[in-house]
Each structure stands twice: as structure tokens, then as C-alpha cells.
Image (cartoon, helix red, strand yellow):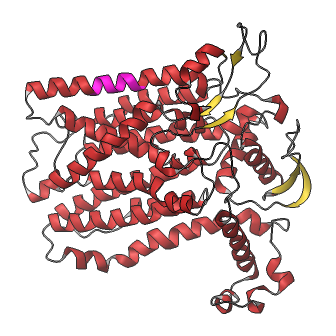
């Protein structure tokens, strides 16, 4: 492993040169240090996400913007009945669109993220601040987790803080942390699973360094729980179950090889039953448990399908006989999920803001969540002849466009330095984009915010490459000077880009010329 930091972290064990086999297995840092930087970056992220959280308040749709109307209404139904119910006025943008009309609603996303939104509504009421509160919390905590994960992964508090800062100032993550949609919760659970597996990796290597067996692995079990919670928020978390599961196994093989195990692959293979528990059984159990309200209710969509139709015992198909042995509730849930899968496979309705995955890193087509047409003199603080007010879900160009050369640098670090972090980050970013290319070929409707789970790993990749640019402890003074200058300029540009685009992210009123200055391409309109 090649360290990319300018120097060992301040809380690293003193005098460690990491030259022996057992020494190289020890973690780069302990969990105790770096909390000052963690708190500062997290507070900054929280301020950006919570200030003006109730704005915009689009009274024409009861305060909802974009898809908030669906998830807000579903969350309110969960509080009322434990399941999503049909509600009046969702499509008509009525002032009070969440009035139940009876009957279970056909919804195509699992309930956990909507339960999180419901907690905010329970605490602060059915108002914009209430239904956006949980998203702001999840977005802020994701920054905290990324600082700690980055610090553990790089051995540098500075680089961990840099990763967190880049996530904090990303426009897309900021917008999704300020809107009642599901994507920011998905990102939280994915980053939490990744962070837990990093701790598990370090603990495993520590035990092997002492000549002990792997023993209990609670952090890996926690990762399985987080991945299950991610799937219970959006199905796309399944991609991370596969990627993180394979990464964890690869890390275990590497740890056993470093410890001198004669057959590291065979030893890891013998531990596969435990891995299956973590990456299959636990996530599935968490996912099914997220439907507890649906099981307990008689109003959920398709809840009584098995009882009224006879279930899978009367169906044809290769798995019908097996499914017919399930309890009625599980049979009904499986049937419900078959309909959800059919919906996703047939989702090809054209949308003005749909985009193609190959254009996501280029920010080719961001999504406008809010753009009122009645902004004029005397309204929304407009003091010009013509004004605009918008929430544009767009990433920080410095981070997103900068990711393209960063990905090339990761490939170089992987090939030339055999740095285990490079392929891990490449795989995690790829899991956020590459699977959607297949769906794009099938003409499925997709949006830029589908790539949101890539953003934390883009930020972490930039921090890793920044450490390499600055050089290690033995780098020349010239290398350190130029590297530090380049990294400082990059960070300054990222922060400046946030400040420049912030009015478009947070619905601040701009005169029309100032708005046009920020719309760099016609595809951003």
C-alpha cells in the first residue's frame, strides 16, 4: 500500500515506520483524533442545509416543489395509517393535496425514506420545514460520515476534512438535502455502509497482525444493516450491495495475504457463509421489516391479494409452487413487487428534464425543481424590471468536471501504485452511473439526481488525488509547494462556485441578467 499523505496523522502511533508485515496491517489512524475538523466541516454543511430550509414555499401546491408532493403525502399517510394511501389533489396541485380518499396507493419505492420524512412532519408539522427536516439531517450526517471515512481511508485528518468539505459545497447534494425526496437518504445509508466496512477492514487487519482469528465482525454486520436500509429506501442500493460485498471480500483476501496466510483465497472462501449472512440475509430481513406497517394494515395496496385470489398456489410459473408455500402476507408482498418491477421496466414517459447517464458528469441536463412564473417587480423581493427565482438541481462544476481527470488519476494510482483505494472508489462511482446506461438503452426516463450516490465518492476521490499531488513525507519541497498550491486553488474554486451558484440552489431572487450569467448552457434552462 502506498500512502498518499504528506505526513502521518497526528494521532498515529508514534515512531511507527510501517516496515514489518504486522505493522503494515495496522490502521493508519485511530478513531479518536480529528474531531475538531469533523465538527467544523459538519457544522458548515448543516448551516448550508438548514438555513432557509422552508424556502421555497410554493403556496400554489401547498408548499411542495417537484416530487415533494408525492413523498410528503405518502409520509403523512404513513403517520395516519402506517401505509401509503390514495390522496386527493396530488396531480392537480391543490392547496391541500394530501387529503386521504381511502384505499392503498400503488407506490413504486419502499417505505423507509418516507418514514424518515414522516418523522420530520411529526416533529415540526406538515409544512415545508417539517417535511424537509429529515433530508437536511441526512445530508448533514452524510458529510460527517464522509470526513471520518476519508480520514480512516487516507490516514489524514486534512484529507478527510477536504472530502467532507467538497461534499458540503456540492450543489446537487445541497439541493437534495433541502427537498423531501428519497435520494439523500439512499446516499446516507450507502456512505454509512462504506464507512462501517472501512472500520471492519481495519479491525480484521489488526486481529490478523496479532495472529488472532477474525472473530466477531459487528461492523460488517452493521454494514449489512445499512445496505438493507438503503434498499428499503430505493432499489438502486442493490448495486452497492454487490460492489461493497465484492470489495469487502477482496480486502479480506488482501489482509490474509499480507498476514502471510498460505492460501488467502481458500481461507476467505471458507468465510463465505458469514458474508452471505451480511450481504444477503440481513439486507433482506431489514427490507421486509420496513414493510411492517403494510403487514399490520388492511389498507395497503395488494395487501389481501393472496387471500382473495388464492395466491401463487393457483398461478403458473417456475417459482409459483415455491411461493405458494409462503404465508399469505408474503405472497401478497411478492405480487405487489412484481407490479413495481413492471412499472420500473416500462418507465419511458418523456420528461423535459430527463438526461442520459453519459452526460451526467458533464452536467449536461440538470433538473429545475422550482421556477415560478409570477416573479416581477415587488414580488419575492424583485427590485428590477424582470427577475427569476429557481431551484436548479445541479452539481458543483468544479467537483463534477474535475472528476473526469480525477478518474484517470485513480486508474494510474491503481495500475502504477497498486493502491487499494483507487479501484474501490472507481467501483463505487461506477455503481452510481454505469448500471443506468443499460436502462438508457432501454429508453427509460432518467434524471441527473440518479447519480447522487456518486457524489461522496467523487469528493473522496478528489481528496485522495489531492494527497498524491502534494506528495508524501519524503517529497521535495518544490513538489509540496506546487501540490499544495494546486489543491488550495481547487478548493477555493469549489467554494467560489458554490457561492456563485447558491442563488440558483436556494431560490434566491435574482434580476434576470444575473440569472442568465449563471445559466452557462442552453441545456441548463
Q: Tag count in the figure?
A: 0
Magenta span includes 78: no
Horizontal side of residue 262 vs 356, given as left or right: left
Magenta span includes 489: yes
Outermost residue, front side: 522
Could you tell me residue 435's position as x and y percent? 48, 60
Quarter of the C terminus within the rendering = top right
Taking 485 as reference, is 307 above or below it? Answer: below
Taking 318 as reference, is 508 above or below it? Answer: above
Q: Residue at x 25, y 26 (%)?
A: 486
Taking 257 as reference, is 60 above or below it? Answer: above
Could you tell me residue 267's position as x and y percent? 24, 77
The residue nearer to you, when weighing 145 against 497, is 497
Horizontal side of residue 202 vs 197, given as left or right: left
Q: Evaluate whether residue 30 shows in this view.
A: no
Instruction: Tell me where the magenta segment starts and ends, as one range.
Output: 487-494
Which quadrant of the structure image shows residue 137? top right
The residue nearer to you, when weighing 431 against 212, is 431
Could you tell me residue 23's position as x and y percent? 13, 53
Q: Evaluate whether residue 81 shows in this view.
A: yes
Horizontal side of residue 39 vs 117, given as left or right: left
Magenta stretch, main secondary structure class: helix
Q: Residue at x 67, y 37 (%)?
A: 132
Outermost residue, right side: 101
Could you tell me residue 27's position as x and y percent? 23, 50
Q: Residue at x 22, y 64 (%)?
A: 254
Amino acid at each position: 500500500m502506498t500512502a498518499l499523505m504528506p505526513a502521518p496523522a497526528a494521532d498515529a502511533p508514534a515512531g511507527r515506520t510501517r516496515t514489518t508485515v504486522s505493522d503494515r496491517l495496522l490502521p493508519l489512524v485511530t478513531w479518536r483524533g480529528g474531531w475538531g475538523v469533523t465538527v467544523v466541516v459538519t457544522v458548515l454543511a448543516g448551516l448550508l442545509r438548514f438555513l432557509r430550509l422552508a424556502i421555497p414555499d410554493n403556496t400554489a401546491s401547498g408548499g411542495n416543489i417537484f416530487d415533494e408532493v408525492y413523498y410528503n403525502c405518502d409520509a403523512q399517510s404513513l403517520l395516519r395509517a402506517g401505509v401509503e394511501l390514495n390522496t386527493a389533489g396530488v396531480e392537480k396541485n391543490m392547496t391541500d393535496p394530501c387529503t386521504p380518499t381511502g384505499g392503498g396507493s400503488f407506490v413504486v419505492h419502499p417505505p423507509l425514506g418516507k418514514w424518515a420524512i414522516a418523522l420530520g412532519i411529526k416533529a415540526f408539522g406538515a409544512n415545508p420545514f417539517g417535511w424537509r427536516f429529515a433530508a437536511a439531517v441526512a445530508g448533514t450526517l452524510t458529510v460527517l460520515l464522509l470526513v471520518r471515512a476519508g480520514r480512516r481511508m487516507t490516514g489524514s485528518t486534512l484529507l478527510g476534512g477536504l472530502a467532507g468539505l467538497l461534499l458540503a459545497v456540492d450543489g446537487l447534494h445541497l439541493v437534495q438535502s433541502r427537498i423531501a425526496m428519497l435520494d439523500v437518504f439512499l446516499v446516507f445509508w450507502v456512505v454509512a455502509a462504506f464507512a462501517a466496512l472501512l472500520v471492519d477492514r481495519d479491525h480484521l487487519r489488526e486481529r490478523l497482525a496479532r495472529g488472532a482469528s477474525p472473530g466477531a465482525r459487528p461492523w460488517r454486520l452493521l454494514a449489512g444493516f445499512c445496505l438493507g436500509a438503503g434498499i428499503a429506501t430505493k432499489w438502486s442500493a442493490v448495486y452497492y450491495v454487490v460492489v461493497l460485498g465484492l470489495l469487502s471480500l477482496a480486502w479480506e483476501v488482501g489482509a490474509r495475504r499480507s498476514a502471510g496466510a498460505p492460501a488467502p483465497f481458500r481461507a476467505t472462501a471458507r468465510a463465505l457463509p458469514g458474508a452471505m449472512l451480511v450481504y444477503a440475509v440481513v439486507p433482506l430481513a431489514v427490507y421486509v421489516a420496513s414493510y411492517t406497517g403494510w403487514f399490520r394494515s388492511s389498507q395497503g395496496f395488494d395487501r389481501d391479494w393472496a387471500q382473495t385470489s388464492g395466491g401463487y398456489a393457483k398461478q403458473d410459473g417456475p417459482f409459483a409452487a415455491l411461493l405458494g408455500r409462503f404465508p399469505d402476507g408474503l405472497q401478497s408482498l411478492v405480487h405487489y413487487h412484481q407490479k413495481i418491477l413492471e412499472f420500473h421496466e416500462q418507465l419511458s414517459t418523456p420528461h423535459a428534464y430527463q438526461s442520459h447517464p453519459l452526460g451526467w458528469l458533464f452536467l449536461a441536463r440538470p433538473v429545475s425543481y422550482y421556477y415560478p412564473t409570477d416573479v416581477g417587480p415587488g414580488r419575492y423581493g424583485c427590485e428590477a424590471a424582470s427577475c427569476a427565482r429557481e431551484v436548479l438541481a445541479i452539481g458543483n462544476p468544479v467537483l463534477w468536471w474535475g472528476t473526469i481527470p480525477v478518474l484517470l488519476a485513480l486508474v494510474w494510482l491503481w495500475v502504477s501504485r497498486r493502491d487499494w483505494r483507487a479501484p474501490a472508489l472507481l467501483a463505487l462511482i461506477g455503481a452510481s452511473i454505469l448500471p443506468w446506461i443499460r436502462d438508457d438503452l432501454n429508453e427509460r426516463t432518467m434524471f441527473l439526481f440518479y447519480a447522487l450516490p456518486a457524489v461522496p465518492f467523487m469528493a473522496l476521490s478528489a481528496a485522495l488525488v489531492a494527497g498524491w499531488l502534494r506528495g508524501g513525507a519524503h517529497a521535495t519541497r518544490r513538489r509540496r509547494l506546487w501540490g499544495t498550491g494546486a489543491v488550495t486553488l481547487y478548493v477555493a474554486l469549489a467554494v467560489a462556485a458554490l457561492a456563485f451558484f447558491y442563488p440558483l440552489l436556494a431560490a434566491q431572487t435574482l434580476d434576470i441578467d444575473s440569472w442568465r450569467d449563471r445559466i452557462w448552457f442552453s441545456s441548463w434552462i
